[in-house]
Amino acid sequence: MSSSEHPVPTTQEPPSGGALRERHGELVAGGVFVVLGGAFAFTSFGYGLGSWDEMGAGMFPFVVGLILAGLGVSVALGGVRGGEVTAGLSRIPWRAVLCVGGAIVAFAYLIPVAGLIPTTVVTVFLSALASPATTLVRALLATAGITLACYVIFVLALQLRLPLYWF
Amino acid sequence: MDLFSNLGLGLETAFQWQNVLFCFIGVALGTAVGVLPGIGPTATIAMLLPITFNFDDPTTALIMLAGIYYGAQYGGSTTAILINLPGESSSAVTAIDGHEMARRGRAGVALATAALGSFAAGTVATVVLAVAAPPLAQVALSFGAAEYFALVVLGLVVSIALARGSVLKALAMIMLGILFGAVGQDTYTGQPRFAFGIPELFSGISFVALAVGVFGIAEILRNLRDPQSRGGTISGVSSLWPTRSDFRRIGGPVGRGTVIGSLLGILPGGGHILASFASYAAEKRLSKNPGEFGHGAIEGVAGPESANNAAAQTSFIPLLTLGIPSNPVMALMIGAFIIQGITPGPTVIDEQPELVWGLIVSMFIGNALLVALNLPLIGIWVRMLKTPYWILFPTIVVLASIGTYAVGLNAYHVLMIAVFGLLGFVLIQCGCEPAPLLLGFVLGPLLEDNFRRAMLISQGDPSTFLTRPLSASLLAVAAAALLVSVLPAMRKKRDLVFVEDD
């Protein structure tokens, strides 16, 4: 069923790029760990480490952050010496990332001000556009159907107390 | 005998007609909401919780809640099997082989196996709970901060030993999870951490947002990138019922899963997810053809589902006796207990025996009702597979957003879905497992809290963890488990536990 919906398969990157490309996933993962671990450790430092018998708010995350950064360095070094072959950042579906991400962000900003129905319409429509196989007609159909279903489930059945519109 | 009089009291309470009726309503509602893709057990229970606030009798309210709990759990397994969307960490394991079975047209068999395995395991675990709860409550009372710390460390280490892929990356994911768990107000000083002045972050990162992001959204992005990896291979549904040979194959895994789950469920925190992982690993190691795992082995559904359900049952032990929630769902249950005027703890079993034993027996009833309700409905759930993806994924996105928002009415939690979805997608692409991240997130606060308390008691002397015999032996087991997973010779074997499923 799905093959007819996706007449244009996304281009597959050949699994064997250059030697660096194959392992740059390890570098990316290691880099993410180093950056996040370092950032957490650095921020924790400002919360006060305290002493070992009376630890400050910063001590535990400071230590864990340093461990994470250390692990990140090892992962990255392992990648240089030859680690797992992974996709890394080489095959990011940009359209899907933008549409799905945008749909969720739009939901977060609209729901407190616009009400449930308009927010649902925007979120469903935006995320429906994420698939290259979805035509405008299908996106509109999906929007109408899913919004109606959400209304029935959350408002009629579950009695979720959320404002429906902005007025 | 004490046990029989206790169970008798429980039966008497649970079989009052209104309790059975509300248990049934709870199971039906829990399943109906739980099968919605993108709405996991946590969101399901959070949304249905307010219904139980209206009862005058706390026993009825909690029995209905237990029904909702089982319904939601089973609904979560259904979406994991049918569309590879685990609503919580424990059903992530079911999804591995369950979804492969669904792709091969055996979705009905997978669902029936999950329901029957859960029922068998739940029944046995109910007895375990009834026998073990009072003595374990005593043992648990002797646990100090150092023992808890050691127990949590062991839980985290075991999860590495059983996950597939690089040990370093699994460790790093745990650390990252612990750091995400540290966001929010510090329990000791009240100081907000990593909140950057945003009041909405003071309460911390939402588990639902993290889980939906790293599992749900990351999976959608992967499917949209490789449309042919999904759907194309899902063949028609060939059979709904397990055959005689299927039944023969699931007996052993269900039995072992029940034992593993009952034991691990008692661990405060993470028992659930550890149970499914441990059972999966055990079945794979015991199997005559381990190559089948990851490609639709029925044992890979029967074992973890039984273990998961048994653990769900016995995880009421730390909840009822210590007031410690072992997972976010249990944390919600504690909230419901407190609203009903009951503070879970070592005394509740003596002070309100009809409540505790009624709840324990109603779990058995809830399980039985679950099977009775869901076996006839399998055909309907399986039709979910026929939903075209262009309808399914926007549905998941919007339901996940609404579900997350409904838990705390906090728009920041919805934003976090997007952040964690993207971060999760990138890390998964780099060969990192999302499950250890989730486990670290859930257990991190428990780890920090007990570490700080133990160090406070010992006046800053870290040898307290090694001089207390129980804590020392738990840490020794953890060290051994870590060593086993790091040793290269063993690592080769460990990789066999989980094959790449993509």
Image (cartoon, coloured by chain):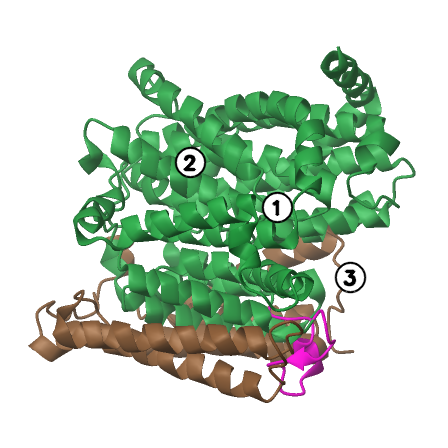
Secondary structure of the residue carrying tag 3 is: loop
The answer to whether residue B371 is left or right of residue B479 is right
Mark 2 — residue?
B304
The disc labelled 3 sits on which kind of residue? Arg
Asked if residue B257 shows in the view, the reply is: yes
Question: How busy is the neighbourhood of tag 2: few (under 14 within 10 Å), some, or many (20 plus)?
Answer: many
Label 2 or label 1, whichever comes before in sequence order: 1
- Chain A: give its colour: brown
Q: Nearer the viewer, residue B43 or A29?
A: A29
**Tag of residue B341:** none
* Mark in front: 3 vs 2: 2
The answer to whether marks 2 and 1 sit on the same chain is: yes
Q: In the visual, does B311 lie left or right of B384?
A: right
- Say which mark, if any, is on residue A161: 3
Highlighted range, magenta: B187-205
Q: In which quarter of the image is the N terminus of chain B?
A: top right
